[in-house]
Image (spheres, grey):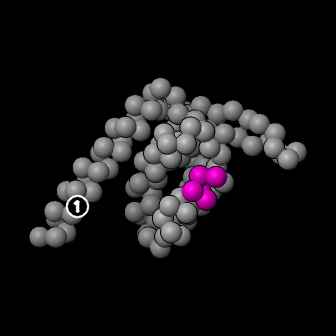
Amino acid sequence: MYSKELIRGTLRTIVLKLLSENGRMYGYEITQKVKELSSDEISLTFGALYPTLHKLEKEGAVTTTSEVVDHRTRKYYALTPKGDATARVKIAEYFAFSKTMHLIMSS
């Protein structure tokens, strides 16, 4: 497991990347996808995920729709055009930062 500090610093980018690849997703689906892709190394809490999703929605990067599934309302999140552009920027920024960190740590 990685520190909360590292996850907190990348959560926004993780969410944007998943939504850009999967179209629309609901909260639990996002947590499970992160768990799967990270081989259980990253476990997102709803207490961290939902504030990030709500902030992205407030900024206009994400839109929501609700759908009833098995008698329960499920809220789906999807990128807006602004969110799609933000995702591309944040993903590129992450890779550039990761490369720089690798240079620093391997010297």
Magenta residues span 29-33
Provide the major secondary structure of the magenta segment: helix
In the rendered structure, the answer to whether residue 96 lies left or right of residue 12 reads: left
Q: Is residue 57 magenta?
A: no
Where does residue 26 sit, x and y in percent of width and height? Answer: 65, 46
Residue 38 image position (x, y, % from top left) = 48, 65
Residue at 47% x, 32% y is 83
SS for dot 1: helix
Please, is residue 20 above or below residue 49 in the view?
above
Instruction: Specify whether residue 32 is painted magenta.
Output: yes
Q: Quadrant of residue 17?
A: top left
- Work out whether residue 53 can be spotted: yes
Write the residue at 19% across / 69% down.
105
The local crowd at label 1, few if under 14, some if 14 to 19, many if 20 or more residues have their Cα within 10 Å, is few
The spot of residue 8 in percent (x, y) is 45, 57
- Amino acid type at image mark 1: Met
Residue at the extreme right of the image, as rendered = 71
Residue drawn at point x = 37 percent, y = 37 percent: 88
Which residue is rendered at x = 16% and y = 62% of the image? Answer: 103
Tell me residue 31's x, y (percent): 59, 57
Residue furthest top as drawn: 81
Q: Which residue is mark 1?
A: 101
Q: How many marks?
A: 1
Relative to 96, residue 86 above or below: above
**Residue 57 appears anywhere in the view:** no
Question: Does 63 sit left or right of 96 as displayed?
Answer: right
